[in-house]
């Protein structure tokens, strides 16, 4: 009788213990971060972020200076410098040279720096509006040229926002766990689609490529947030009319110079100033940051005046803004990674960076990055 009574008590106690453990799991453990903030950090550190772990870049040797342009169109050195900030651009010359030839040295440099073989690349994305040809993609051609035998990839056309859009796409592949090494290239051979008799566009653009390697990070470094936007009604102001399915290339389209960039500079300028400044400010606000928290603004290099307006809106002084437009002009998808390439040595682990771009489409956006290594 005694034995059976104590047996019942033991059962009762066991039930109590089970119930306590059950309620702990249901109510307490999921809310542990409310009681112990450090616990939350541990959980967060398990989240995969996409960190930039290496940078490569390439600009062709040939320079096209403002003085050179004065011999080609009715312009002057001072007008170009004061209205745009550009002093010279690089031009890829030579028979059979195309955008993939800008990408190859940039990607190979990145692989060398990181100590990896191209065969380790899982995916290679090329942001560009000047692909070697419509298909196959420039990504395919680059992978073939560098021996990235295990990679898949594609081109992404978002004009001057091409690198940002590609970066966000590559980030998703890393965050989802699908890929371990994604190379994102921004590259354009703008000289292929510029009319060198049109002084309003030929002064702006240049050729170049920059590339970054994305890898998983478990400590919260890397691409933290992005706001990307498009507005197709902007097509009217900036486009290349011919060569697509709407106006396939013909004698007529070539005679009408529709295989070149068409731009209404002033209208684009107004949209760009507002778009880039607004989205950068929105990104800061969304992440509860101010200009003081930002180590570097890495802006698309279209016009120095657009860059200054964006920096002002973010409350950033000029010494926190990467600018190389004076040396390369607007390389479209290439500008942001080329800035990173030029500034790499100054970057420190933990720096907050904002990348911001505006381009044809219209396309625009901003990305927040916590830098993952000391340059
Ligand atoms: N050299 C000398 N004068 C020029 C010139 C040149 N290369 N290009 C234009 N001009 C003249 C114009 O004919 C005009 O003369 P006018 O007043 O007698 O008519 C005057 O300069 C002002 O032209 P405007 O078009 O208002 O110049 P701007 O200050 O807007 O600068 C751009 C022109 C193209 C540099 C500027 O509009 C711009 O940067 N736009 C955005 C470009 C951009 O971001 N594009 C890519 C998207 S990423």
Image (cartoon, rainbow, N blue to C red):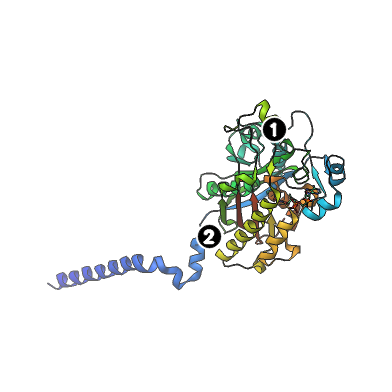
User: Can you see residue 112?
Assistant: yes
The number of callouts visible is: 2
* In this view, the mark in front (1 or 2): 1
The numbered mark at residue 256 is: 1
- Residue 117: x and y in percent read 66, 39
Instruction: Answer above or below: position of 94 versus 209.
Output: above
Q: In the image, what residue occupies the spot 58% across and 35% down? A: 150
Q: CA distance from mark 1 to mark 2?
A: 57 Å
Dots 1 and 2: beta carbons under 8 Å?
no
Question: Ligand 1 near label 1 (Cβ, under 8 Å)?
Answer: no
Image quadrant occupied by the C terminus: bottom right
Mark 1 lies on a secondary structure that is: loop
Q: In the image, what residue occupies the spot 73% across and 42% down? A: 208
User: Can you see residue 371?
Assistant: no
- Residue 195: x and y in percent read 75, 38
Q: Which residue is labeled 2 in the image? A: 45
Within 10 Å of the Cα at label 2, are there few (<14), some (14-19), or many (20+) other Cα atoms?
some
Mark 2 lies on a secondary structure that is: helix
Q: Which corner quadrant of the image does residue 118 belong to?
A: top right
330 displayed left or right of 21: right
Residue placed farthest to the left in the image? Answer: 1
Question: Ligand 1 near label 2 (Cβ, under 8 Å)?
Answer: no
Q: In the image, what residue occupies the spot 57% across and 55% down? A: 226
Q: Which corner quadrant of the image does residue 348 belong to?
A: bottom right
Q: In the image, what residue occupies the spot 57% across and 47% down? A: 233
Image quadrant occupied by the N terminus: bottom left
Residue 41 or residue 140, whichever sits in front: 140
79 displayed left or right of 53: right
Q: Earlier in the sequence, mark 1 or mark 2?
A: 2
- Residue 222: x and y in percent read 60, 55
Residue 160 or residue 39, whichever sits in front: 160
Within 10 Å of the Cα at label 1, are there few (<14), some (14-19), or many (20+) other Cα atoms?
few
């Amino acid at each position: 009788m005694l034995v059976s009574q104590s047996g019942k008590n033991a059962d009762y106690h066991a039930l109590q213990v089970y119930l306590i453990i059950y309620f702990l799991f249901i109510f307490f453990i999921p809310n542990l971060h409310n009681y112990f903030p450090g616990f939350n950090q541990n959980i967060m550190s398990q989240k995969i972020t996409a960190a930039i772990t290496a940078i490569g870049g390439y600009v062709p040797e040939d320079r096209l200076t403002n003085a050179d342009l004065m011999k080609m169109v009715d312009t002057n050195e001072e007008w170009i410098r004061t209205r745009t900030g550009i002093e010279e651009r690089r031009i890829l010359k030579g028979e059979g040279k195309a955008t993939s030839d800008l990408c190859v040295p940039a990607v190979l440099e990145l692989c060398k720096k990181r100590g990896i073989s191209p065969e380790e690349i899982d995916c290679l994305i090329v942001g560009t509006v000047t692909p070697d040809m419509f298909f196959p993609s420039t990504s395919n051609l680059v992978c073939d040229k560098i021996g990235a035998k295990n990679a898949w990839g594609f081109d992404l056309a978002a004009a001057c926002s091409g690198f940002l859009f590609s970066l966000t796409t590559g980030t998703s592949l890393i965050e989802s766990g699908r890929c371990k090494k994604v190379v994102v290239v921004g590259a354009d051979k703008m000289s292929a689609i510029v009319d060198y008799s049109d002084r309003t566009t030929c002064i702006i653009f240049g050729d170049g490529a920059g590339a970054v390697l994305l890898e998983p990070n478990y400590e919260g470094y890397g691409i933290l947030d992005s706001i990307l936007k498009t507005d197709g009604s902007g097509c009217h102001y900036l486009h290349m009319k011919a060569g697509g399915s709407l106006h396939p290339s013909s004698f007529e389209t070539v005679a009408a110079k529709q295989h070149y960039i068409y731009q209404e500079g002033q209208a684009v300028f107004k949209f760009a100033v507002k778009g880039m400044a607004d989205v950068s400010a929105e990104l800061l606000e969304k992440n509860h940051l101010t200009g003081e928290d930002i180590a570097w603004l890495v802006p698309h290099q279209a016009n120095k005046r657009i860059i200054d307006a964006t920096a002002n809106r973010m409350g950033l002084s000029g010494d926190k803004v990467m600018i190389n437009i004076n040396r390369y002009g607007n390389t479209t998808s290439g500008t942001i990674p080329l800035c990173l390439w030029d500034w790499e040595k100054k970057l420190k682990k933990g720096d907050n960076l904002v990348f911001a771009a505006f381009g044809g489409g219209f396309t625009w956006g901003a990305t927040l990055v916590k830098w993952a290594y000391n340059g």
